[in-house]
Amino acid sequence: MKARLKWVQDVMWVAESETGHAVVMDGAPEIGGRNLGMRPMEMLLLGMGGCTAMDVISILKKSREQVTDCEIQMEAKRAEDHPKVFTAIHVHFIVTGKALKEATVKRAIDLSAEKYCSASIMLGKTASITHDYEIREES
């Protein structure tokens, strides 16, 4: 995997992935930024969320569950001192569908956390990662 970052000004960067997608990263005004893009640590947290979300939906679809929506809410705490690594991350899944089986939803989340989500497993080396979920019935 390759990536490229191009400095724009101050602490602003354009980050481009090997697949050609780009995002702007910027810092807070107190460190010289203009708050015009996501912070790198925000992107790291969102990357973990995207990784586990893709796993969970894929597992549920392979299990023939009728998922119609999924939302993931995340909250992270960071160390006070440098390096300000993530120390705790909580992931809350809201899975919506028709006649979803709770055991299958739980299993999909556990499989992602313990086996498939490389981002979660990597961040789990410094952070305590917890998960919970709610299932909503499609009306």
Image (cartoon, rainbow, N blue to C red):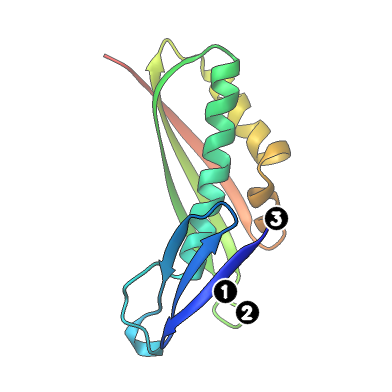
Crowding at dot 2, Cα within 10 Å, few <14 / some 14-19 / many 20+, comes out as few
Residue 76: percent from left, percent from top? 49, 60
Secondary element at tag 3: helix
Q: Circles 2 and 1: CB distance less than 8 Å?
A: yes
Which residue in the structure is indicated by mark 2? 83
From mark 3 to mark 2, how far is it between C-alphas? 16 Å
Residue at figure coordinates x 57%, y 74% from the top left: 79
Q: Amino acid at mark 1?
A: Ala
Dot label at residue 79:
1
Q: Amino acid at mark 2?
A: Pro
Residue 106: percent from left, percent from top? 57, 26
Q: Amino acid at mark 3?
A: Met
Dot label at residue 122:
3
Furthest-left residue in this view:
139
22 left or right of 81? left
Can you tell which quarter of the image residue 123 is in?
bottom right
